[in-house]
Image (spheres, helix red, strand yellow):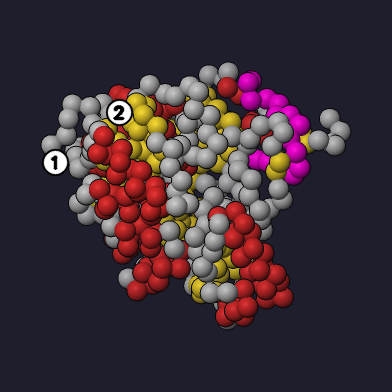
């Protein structure tokens, strides 16, 4: 596909508070037409944004109609998203407009944790034993699993309505709670996945696919979450792993992506190591953390996932596939914990953290006046702290300091 000097790409529901995403687009020579998230503040748009399309993704047919009209007025060369929930819509829109993109069936499968696990099981990959529950009344179908188990919505993301259940006596309550929370927060639910809980360290893998070839860019360490809820805590890259374990992870992730048909574009895969063997938990056909993983990957190996995602969206070759991926440093994302519930009165310490010489970005997402609901409900993360380090041990040491530097207080609490 021949593209103009500055191709235009529609970026569906980006998080505007991540400046490096837009810096990457500008440096790579792209103009962006954004479809904003509902209620987004559009008063100070980043430089590469040349237009805004206000589309209601809850009415996908009308939204695709809006894209067709915009395309007729001034064509764009691609459409992409870094937001998990918008992956199926973006694939449908690309197909409707004849643009490069994931096949619609693949985009829908990657948003269905049950379909994903069935594909991995059929391919003989390592994955936890699981079952899908098609209605709250069918919760007993999971009783033959080995407890503890994890209950999660098949169409969920960001730990929404995810909980660990230690014994069969509490399974029904958890399935019902997951069903109800997901229906309220995501607007609908078709099934709940119940899977055996795996004990072991957790990792995230950032990769780029191009014409069926997967290039693993970096592997990051995420701790060993124990539940009962799975609020994200930190991400440190590159993970300190022996070469044979890295090779096993790379093989398993590439096979998992191939099994569900994610052949092109960025992906974010999460897994656990059990007795040294990688077990894939889930994958997303987008950049992790709405763009956070692009910062981490660029800091650790020099690969710009945002630029590569936009290149793939217009049918061009990603730069990550043109040369070997080589280490160049370490990076981390510390996710400020909510630490309570209720209406936020104040968040102390973020300015001091932002002034730390290792910190490049503090992305604040919750503010005073916002209400934090108790888990397994999910209100969002207060802030991301993105930092760059010489070695991963330095990122670990820095993250150990941060709980004492940031404090969230809630209305009615004594300060």
Range shown magenta:
336-352
Most foreground residue, 179 or 148: 179
Q: Which residue is mark 2?
A: 31
Does residue 352 lie above or below 179 as drawn? above
Q: Quadrant of the C terminus?
A: top right
Instruction: Please provide percent x and percent y for residue 186.
Output: 55, 55
Residue 305: where, in percent of width, then height?
34, 38
Tell me if residue 230 is in the magenta stretch: no
Looking at the image, residue 299 sits to the left or right of residue 136; the answer is left
| The N terminus, quarter of image | top left
Q: Position of residue 284 (x, y in %)?
A: 41, 52
Q: Secondary structure at mark 1?
A: loop
Q: Is residue 348 magenta?
A: yes
User: Relative to the observer, which residue lies in front, 65 or 287?
Assistant: 65
In this rendering, the answer to whether 371 lies above or below 279 is: above
Going 24% across and 39% down the picture, which residue do you hit? Answer: 72
As drawn, which residue projects farthest toward the left? 2
Residue named by callout 1:
1
């Amino acid at each position: 596909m021949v593209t103009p000097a500055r191709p235009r790409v529609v970026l569906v529901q980006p998080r505007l508070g991540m400046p490096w995403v837009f810096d990457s687009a500008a440096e790579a020579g792209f103009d962006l037409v954004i479809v904003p998230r509902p209620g987004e503040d559009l008063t100070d748009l980043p430089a590469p944004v040349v237009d805004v399309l206000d589309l209601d993704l809850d009415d996908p047919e009308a939204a695709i109609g809006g894209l067709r009209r915009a395309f007729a007025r001034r064509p764009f060369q691609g459409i992409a998203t870094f937001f998990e929930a918008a992956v199926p819509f973006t694939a449908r829109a690309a197909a409707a407009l004849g643009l490069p993109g994931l096949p619609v069936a693949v985009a829908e499968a990657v948003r269905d944790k049950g379909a994903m696990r069935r594909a991995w099981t059929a391919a003989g990959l390592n994955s936890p034993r699981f079952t899908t529950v098609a209605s709250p009344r069918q919760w007993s179908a999971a009783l033959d699993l080995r407890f503890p188990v994890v209950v999660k919505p098949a169409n969920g993301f960001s730990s929404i309505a995810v909980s660990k259940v230690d014994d069969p006596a509490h399974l029904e309550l958890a399935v019902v709670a997951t069903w109800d929370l997901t229906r309220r927060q995501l607007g609908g639910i078709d099934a709940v996945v119940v899977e055996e809980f795996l004990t072991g360290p957790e990792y995230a893998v950032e990769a780029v696919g191009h014409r069926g070839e997967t290039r693993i860019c970096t592997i990051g360490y995420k701790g060993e979450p124990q539940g009962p809820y799975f609020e994200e805590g930190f991400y440190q890259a590159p993970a300190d792993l022996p070469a044979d374990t890295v090779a096993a992870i790379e093989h398993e992730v590439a096979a998992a992506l191939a099994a569900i048909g994610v052949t092109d574009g960025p992906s974010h895969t999460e897994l656990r190591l059990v007795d040294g063997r990688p077990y894939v938990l889930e994958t997303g056909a987008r950049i992790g953390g709405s763009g956070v993983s692009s910062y981490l990957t660029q800091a650790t190996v020099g690969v710009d996932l945002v630029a590569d995602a936009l290149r793939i969206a217009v049918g061009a070759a990603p730069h990550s596939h043109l040369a070997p991926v080589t280490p160049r440093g370490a990076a981390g994302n510390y996710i400020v914990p909510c630490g309570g519930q209720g209406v936020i009165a104040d968040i102390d310490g973020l300015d001091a953290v932002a002034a730390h010489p290792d910190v490049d970005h503090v992305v604040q997402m919750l503010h005073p006046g916002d209400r934090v609901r108790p888990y397994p409900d999910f209100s969002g993360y207060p802030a991301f702290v993105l930092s760059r380090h010489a070695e991963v041990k330095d990122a670990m040491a820095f993250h150990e300091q941060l709980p004492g530097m940031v404090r969230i207080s809630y209305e009615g609490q004594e300060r």
